[in-house]
Image (cartoon, grey):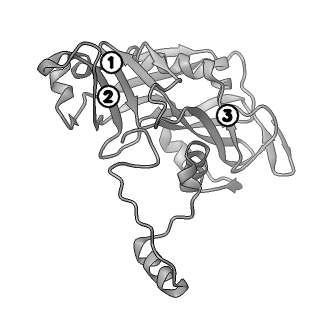
Amino acid sequence: MKTFNNKITLNLDEDAEVFVTGFIEPIAYTGSNFHKRWSALANLQVAEPEKRYPPSVFHAFLPGGFVSVGECWEIEKKGVLALLQQLSPNPSLDMRNDGGDSCGLWACLRAYNDQFADIMFRIHAEFAIQDGWFTPSQLAGHLVIDRRQEIVEFFQLRVPEGILNFDVNWETTEDGWDPGIVITDAGYCPQMELHSGTQKGVQALKFTETITQEEAAHKLACCFYKSQQINWVSLENALEMAQAQQKPIHAISISGTLADEAC
């Protein structure tokens, strides 16, 4: 454990295994009832409900050197793929829809004190399932490290809540579609998650150097989308600014989100 000019390093004991539980609840709904018509989606379930991992898997989330609160770095792919295989056996970090999907794995040091460090992260991935693939809006989470003992105190990787939190692409001949044609849908899954440790104790931690979860989430979103680097204002404020500055408003209407892969 090292600290220098408000920068810290993080490491893990090579002998401390991490026990992780996995959950996937049944799909709640999809726009075109794919979760009822497509058996692979209807029967989507976690590949391994319980699994033990060597600490080397979680080294993928750690920075390569000294890092300060609010600083972001890229996550190594190998360890992440091992974890995602616990959810579903065929994950990929290379997104297929090049026109809109944003590849990447990023982490941000959100907070630390003399004993603990809280890393927030965001991952974009997809899972191949029979006759198609499943794309979460994002896989987001926390990794809390005990800096003194060099162990994983808490880990959570999940698909966040949302009206729509995944896309699916289905290659089907149903309804007369030609072979090779892929049709798409979006929907909501109540829980798709990997978990280790107890969140209650982590929530009670007091940090000496910190940013809010919202600030860290925004920093991570900016690593994926240039649209998140824009200083957005509300419509009401835009109208006031346009009137004060005597400038026109260029309005664009979109049917989905600009900040995840569920559109």
Characterize the local packing of mark 1: few (<14), some (14-19) or many (20 or more) Cα atoms within 10 angstroms: some
Quarter of the rendering occupied by the N terminus: top right
Residue occupied by mark 2: 168
Residue occupied by mark 1: 132
Residue 213 visible from this viewpoint: no
Q: Nearer the viewer, mark 3 or mark 2?
A: 2
**Furthest residue toward right:** 4
Identity, as a three-letter code, of the amino acid under mark 1: Gly
The spot of residue 142 in percent (x, y) is: 55, 38
Distance between mark 3 and mark 2 Cα atoms: 26 Å
The spot of residue 239 in percent (x, y) is: 43, 79
Q: Nearer the viewer, mark 3 or mark 1?
A: 1
Identity, as a three-letter code, of the amino acid under mark 2: Val
Q: Nearer the viewer, residue 35 or 180?
A: 180
Distance between mark 1 and mark 2 Cα atoms: 7 Å
Left or right placement of residue 13 versus residue 216 in this view: right
Tell me which numbered mark, 3 or 1, is placed earlier along the sequence: 3
Q: Residue at the location (56% across, 34% down)? A: 154
Element type at mark 3: strand
> Which image quadrant for residue 137?
top left
Characterize the local packing of mark 3: few (<14), some (14-19) or many (20 or more) Cα atoms within 10 angstroms: some
Element type at mark 1: strand
Distance between mark 3 and mark 1 Cα atoms: 28 Å
Identity, as a three-letter code, of the amino acid under mark 3: Glu
Residue occupied by mark 3: 74
Quarter of the rendering occupied by the C terminus: top left
**What mark, if any, has residue 83 been given in the picture?**
none
Tell me which numbered mark, 3 or 2, is placed earlier along the sequence: 3
**Furthest residue toward left:** 175
